[in-house]
């Protein structure tokens, strides 16, 4: 193994392998280093083992960042269609599940094998398992590892974030950024289940396992914060658990949720509750109870518990046709805006991604290179660009890796 390379890439996840492969196929001498015995663990477990490898609708609007325009260039230059062409060339069967999400027909391992084969085609030297002991740059980059010292003209950090530590996730990339005085945006767990406190769990905890379709968003309670916040609605399924809230809708809004915010569910999916109640009241034969009516739009167990929590005893015991205006108005508001206040998230252990990271204002959006340190690049999850649930974060991995690889 040669001690000097055109580029050393640390982190053999989705972004790291893809960057190494593309740079190698451009004729660059690339060394790819990872501390894991088994490569691509996050790829392997993604999408229930079938890897939601991209989303055909991916656009800058599907990503969060303190610098929201940063991702535009990379996403425009390497699109979901480009990655699909590669998958197709390897004859990997895939299908669209919902909302543009593309999954392998068989196994996530097919994507890992494809990336490793692409690396072989680029004559990438792969060093793993190997721990990086230190990195410095007296003139060129010098990477000291548990298996020797190597130098390079370019150094690419593709070590990911803090999410799912069981896969080997660490804060190594952030440490390198700090070492070279690259600013960081504070990190937190994203695409993560939310916890409810004891009173809410006492009311709804027995519904663990109940899923329901909804229109959901996170919303600050403070009027000033609400005015300044970005309200993004997600029309997906939510799931009640023994610890709180999960499911696609909740994971999506968790990336927009801040401590103290409410989670707001529209149980009617955007339909005006007053109109819905008016139709029910006019129906013949008359519906005997509100819980029975609500069970037409949410599971019966949830309908029973929700009706018990949000209607008076007198309203509960009579048909909707006999409800007075106050009872109707109160329930209508709650149906379109059922508010719960989470006590927190379940943390990085259960999070699919890490929000925050290397401040993109310190990077070139064309090359992913640090503006203040020649040859130093950051790609993938370690950067302050976080996608929605549904293949968007993989697309950012491919796009940022491609942008970086073309510049090395």
Image (cartoon, helix red, strand yellow):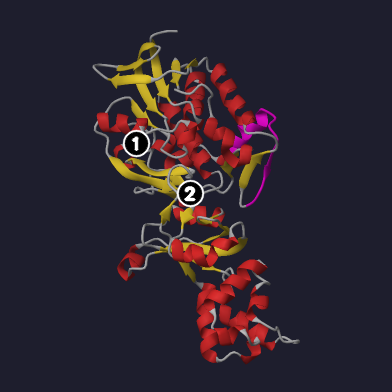
Please name the residue that numbered disc 2 is placed on.
Answer: 191
Q: Are marks 2 and 1 in contact (CB under 8 Å)?
A: no
Question: In the figure, 267 relative to 364: above or below?
Answer: below
Report if residue 301 is visible in the image.
Answer: yes
Q: Position of residue 94 (x, y in %)?
A: 68, 38
Magenta includes 93?
yes
Could you say which is closer to the camera, residue 375 or residue 218? 218
Could you say which is closer to the camera, residue 285 or residue 72? 285
Q: Please tell me how crowded label 1 is: few (under 14), some (14-19), or many (20+) other residues with Cα within 10 Å.
A: some
Give the quadrant of the C terminus. top left
Q: Position of residue 298 (x, y in %)?
A: 64, 68
* Mark number, residue 364: 1
Q: Position of residue 74 (x, y in %)?
A: 45, 38
- Tell me which residue sits at (52%, 44%) in the image: 392
Could you say which is closer to the camera, residue 39 or residue 3? 39
- Tell me which residue sits at (56%, 91%) in the image: 324
Magenta-highlighted residues: 81-98
Image quarter of residue 304: bottom right
Give the quadrant of the N terminus. top left
Q: Position of residue 27 (x, y in %)?
A: 48, 16
Question: In the figure, 368 relative to 325: above or below?
Answer: above
Separation of residues labelled 2 and 1 (CA atoms): 26 Å
- Tell me which residue sits at (53%, 29%) in the image: 40
């Amino acid at each position: 193994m040669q001690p000097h390379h055109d580029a050393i890439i640390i982190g053999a996840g989705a972004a790291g392998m893809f960057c190494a492969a593309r740079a190698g196929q451009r004729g660059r001498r690339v060394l790819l280093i990872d501390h894991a015995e088994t490569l691509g663990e996050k790829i392997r477990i993604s999408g229930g083992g079938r890897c939601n490898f991209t989303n055909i609708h991916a656009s800058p609007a599907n990503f969060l960042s303190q610098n929201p325009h940063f991702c535009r260039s990379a996403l425009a230059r390497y699109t979901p269609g480009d990655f699909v062409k590669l998958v197709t060339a390897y004859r990997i069967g895939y299908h669209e599940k919902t909302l543009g999400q593309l999954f392998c027909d068989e196994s996530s391992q097919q994507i890992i094998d494809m990336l490793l084969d692409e690396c072989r085609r680029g004559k990438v030297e792969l060093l793993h398992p190997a721990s990086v002991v230190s990195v410095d740059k007296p003139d060129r980059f010098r990477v000291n590892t548990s298996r020797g010292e190597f130098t390079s003209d370019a150094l690419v950090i593709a070590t990911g974030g803090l999410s799912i530590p069981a896969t080997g996730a660490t804060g190594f990339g952030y440490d390198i950024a700090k070492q070279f005085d690259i600013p960081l945006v504070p990190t937190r767990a994203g695409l993560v289940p939310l916890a409810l406190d004891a009173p809410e769990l006492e009311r709804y905890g027995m519904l663990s396992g109940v899923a329901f379709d909804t229109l959901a968003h996170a919303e600050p309670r403070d009027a000033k914060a609400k005015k300044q916040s970005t309200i993004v609605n997600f029309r997906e399924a939510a799931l009640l658990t023994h610890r709180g809230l999960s499911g696609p809708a909740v994971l999506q809004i968790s990336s927009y949720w801040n401590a103290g915010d409410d989670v707001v569910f529209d149980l009617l999916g955007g339909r005006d509750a007053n109109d819905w109640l008016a139709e029910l009241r006019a129906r013949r034969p008359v519906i005997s109870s509100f819980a029975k009516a609500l069970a037409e739009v949410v599971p019966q167990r949830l309908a029973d518990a929700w009706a018990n929590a949000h209607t008076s005893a007198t309203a509960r015991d009579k048909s909707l046709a006999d409800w007075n205006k106050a009872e109707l108005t109160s329930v209508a508001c709650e149906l379109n805006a059922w508010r719960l206040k989470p006590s927190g998230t379940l943390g990085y252990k259960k999070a699919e991604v890490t929000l925050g990271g290397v401040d993109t204002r310190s990077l070139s959006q064309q090359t992913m290179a640090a503006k203040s340190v020649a040859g130093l690049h950051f790609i993938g999850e370690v950067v302050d660009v976080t996608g929605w649930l549904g293949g968007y974060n993989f697309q950012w991995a491919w796009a940022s890796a491609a942008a970086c690889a073309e510049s090395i």
